[in-house]
Image (spheres, rainbow, N blue to C red):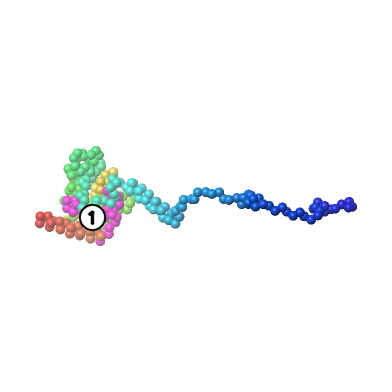
């Protein structure tokens, strides 16, 4: 249409000067567009992760040791066997090659606790029992083995090969966890000639605090412990310890004669 201003919607005349906002309005606008962060209490510093992996490993190791020591047959006094200077606890256990059946006698003195045996172990008369009170009349090498889940028999094989060179020493095996017939078959198959005591329910192992297979106990005449060796020993190591045992026995004998 003629005379119509097509640009009239944009306004006419010069633009008005914008009104200057007050300082209070500017602060209000800033508060709206840039609010201050909410204040929180400071966090407690946390330990870094630098050693977290080490702590985790140590905890797992501690748990493993706890499970191991509680699972092994012992009275809680340790699993390293008798200590040097200790007196060997008395026991009488069925001989693998004999005909006695039942559990080992671990009664130390009268009155005997229930399930330990009717008589003190030293009073068990049977010749088909391996009796510590007879073994300890000479220096003694007593080897503890467990045949299930372990490979301890070769230690006894090594003892067998050298025991003939030490005629003044008693040798015996304490086999735990087997019935008498099983123990007899193992001893016969491997050609063991030393007496094998059968500790079917682990009473002797528990009494001695043994938790490592094999464990070899060397004792002087009378049953005083000289050394306890954990794990396998070579024939050379066995000979060396037997010579030490006999030297200690001779020294003890000289002191006894001079008293």
* Residue most extreme to the left: 258
Q: Nearer the viewer, residue 144 or 76?
A: 76
Q: Please tell me in which quadrant of the rendered image residue 52 appears.
A: bottom left
74 part of magenta stretch: no
Q: Nearer the viewer, residue 8 or 163?
A: 8
What residue appears at the point 22 percent right and 58 percent down from the top-left corner?
Answer: 241
Q: Nearer the viewer, residue 62 or 101?
A: 62
Q: Please tell me in which quadrant of the rendered image residue 91 appears.
A: top left
Part of the protein shown in magenta: 209-236
Number of marks in picture? 1
Residue 53: x and y in percent read 43, 55
Residue 92: x and y in percent read 21, 45
Which residue does the numbered mark 1 point to in the structure image? 227
* Residue most extreme to the right: 2
Residue 123: x and y in percent read 17, 43
Residue 213: x and y in percent read 30, 52
What residue appears at the point 21 percent right and 55 percent down from the top-left corner?
Answer: 226
What residue appears at the point 81 percent right and 54 percent down from the top-left corner?
Answer: 13
Q: Secondary structure at mark 1?
A: strand
State left or right for residue 40 relative to residue 115. Answer: right
Within-10-Å neighbours for mark 1: few <14, some 14–19, many 20+: many
Quarter of the figure with the C terminus:
bottom left
Let me know if residue 84 appears in the view.
yes
State left or right for residue 256 relative to residue 179. Answer: left
């Amino acid at each position: 249409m003629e005379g119509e201003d097509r640009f009239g919607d944009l306004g006419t005349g010069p633009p008005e000067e914008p009104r200057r906002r007050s300082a209070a309005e500017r602060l209000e606008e800033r508060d709206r567009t840039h609010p201050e962060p909410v204040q929180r209490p400071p966090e407690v510093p946390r330990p870094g992760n630098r050693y977290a992996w080490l702590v985790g490993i140590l905890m797992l190791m501690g748990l493993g040791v706890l499970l191991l020591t509680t699972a092994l047959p012992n009275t809680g006094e340790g699993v390293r066997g008798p200590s040097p200077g200790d007196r060997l606890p008395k026991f009488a256990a069925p001989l693998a090659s004999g005909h006695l059946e039942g559990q080992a006698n671990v009664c130390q003195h009268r009155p005997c606790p229930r399930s330990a045996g009717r008589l003190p172990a030293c009073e068990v008369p049977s010749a088909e029992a391996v009796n510590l009170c007879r073994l300890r009349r000479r220096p003694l090498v007593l080897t503890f083995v467990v045949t299930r889940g372990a490979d301890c028999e070769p230690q006894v094989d090594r003892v067998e090969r050298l025991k003939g060179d030490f005629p003044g020493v008693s040798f015996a095996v304490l086999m735990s966890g087997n019935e008498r017939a099983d123990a007899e078959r193992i001893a016969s198959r491997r050609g063991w000639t030393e007496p094998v005591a059968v500790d079917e329910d682990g009473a002797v192992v528990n009494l001695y605090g043994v938790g490592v297979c094999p464990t070899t106990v060397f004792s002087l005449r009378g049953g005083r412990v000289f050394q306890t060796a954990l794990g396998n020993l070579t024939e050379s190591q066995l000979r060396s310890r037997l010579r030490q045992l006999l030297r200690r026995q001779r020294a003890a004998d000289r002191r006894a004669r001079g008293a």
